[in-house]
Image: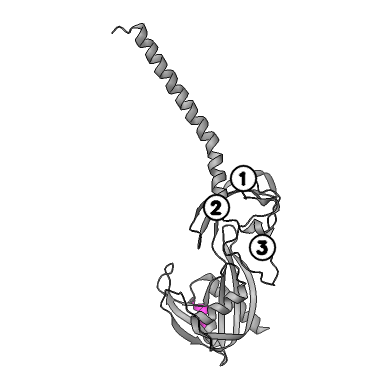
């Protein structure tokens, strides 16, 4: 087949434009990818840095570098108001943060770039981090000395389980206020003494919020009313201290936060 000079020029021209097009596409991908990252960060609801809990506004606007930030939370027992799903950055460890998914209410998935202080040259660029709102658990004890727990089913548990009172801390709400609210909503009771047992990270390496544990004592029916938003069917169960200990040992409380709260409560009562 004979290819004329004009046809060869046309082929070369098309090839040149194809090469130029591919090159422009590669350049666009390189240039626009960081911009997309910045746009994602700009769309993240600003929470933690507005309270001056993050030095250098790590993660705010176009600032993705997180080196030199401070811990996000005041760990004092004054129980400061919660920002619901706050943003965690660890001083000297967190280099950058990218949000991957969030429903805006109950769950947020982030990818952190992390360096450990002991190995400053070893950077982990795909450290997955999850946040959920902080939560409260309350072991409620009535004026008769018996403890009120619930028999119920949960989506993530096989079969039936004994459970404590509890729920998520709302944005702007302190943990002790959330504990009292949950007791009133779920039982119609108020506790004369709400003893704070401590707050604990739920997962040491992946986040999942903090647990605030409480022992509610001298709880009795209240004249106040509050509507509960619980979807599960809950059957009230009353246990004395011996029965409570036995049910914990048997594994009847199938979530670790419930078991930990009960253990802390029993230890505090033994003092």
For label 2, count other residues whose C-alpha is less than 10 Å away and answer few (under 14), some (14-19) or many (20+).
Answer: some
Residue with the mark numbered 1: 62
Name which residue lies at 45% across and 22% down.
19
Residue with the mark numbered 3: 73
User: In front here: 129 or 8?
Assistant: 8
Main SS of the magenta part reads: helix
Give the extent of the magenta segment. Answer: 246-250
Name which residue lies at 67% across and 51% down.
57
Query: Which callout, 1 or 2, points at the residue further toward the start of the chain?
Result: 1
For label 1, count other residues whose C-alpha is less than 10 Å away and answer few (under 14), some (14-19) or many (20+).
Answer: some
Name which residue lies at 60% across and 76% down.
177
Which dot marks residue 25? Answer: none
Answer yes or no: is residue 36 visible: yes
If the image is split into quadrants, where does the N terminus sit?
top left
Q: Nearer the viewer, mark 1 or mark 2?
A: 1
Residue 213 x, y percent position in the rendering: 60, 74
């Amino acid at each position: 087949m004979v290819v004329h000079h004009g046809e060869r020029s046309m082929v070369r021209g098309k090839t040149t434009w194809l090469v130029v097009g591919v090159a422009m596409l590669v350049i666009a991908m390189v240039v626009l990818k960081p911009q997309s990252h910045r746009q994602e960060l700009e769309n993240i609801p600003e929470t933690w840095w507005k309270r001056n809990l993050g030095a250098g506004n790590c993660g705010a606007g176009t600032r993705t570098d997180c080196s030199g930030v401070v811990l996000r939370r005041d760990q004092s027992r004054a129980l400061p108001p919660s920002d619901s799903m706050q943003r965690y950055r660890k001083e000297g460890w967190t280099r950058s943060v990218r949000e991957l998914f969030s429903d805006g209410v109950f769950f947020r998935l982030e990818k952190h770039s992390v360096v450990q202080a002991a190995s400053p040259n070893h950077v982990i660029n795909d450290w997955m981090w999850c946040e959920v709102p902080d939560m409260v658990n309350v072991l409620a004890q009535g004026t008769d000395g018996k403890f009120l727990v619930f028999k119920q089913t949960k989506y993530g548990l096989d079969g039936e389980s004994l459970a404590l009172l509890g729920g998520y801390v709302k944005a702007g709400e302190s943990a002790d206020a959330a504990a009292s609210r949950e007791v009133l909503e779920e039982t119609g009771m108020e506790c004369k003494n709400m003893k704070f047992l401590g707050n604990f990270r739920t997962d040491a390496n992946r986040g999942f919020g903090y647990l605030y544990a409480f022992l509610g004592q001298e709880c009795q029916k209240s004249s106040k009313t509050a509507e509960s938003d619980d979807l599960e069917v809950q059957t009230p169960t009353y246990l004395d201290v011996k029965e409570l200990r036995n049910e914990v040992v048997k594994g009847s409380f199938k979530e670790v936060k419930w078991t930990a709260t009960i253990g802390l409560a029993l230890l505090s009562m033994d003092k």
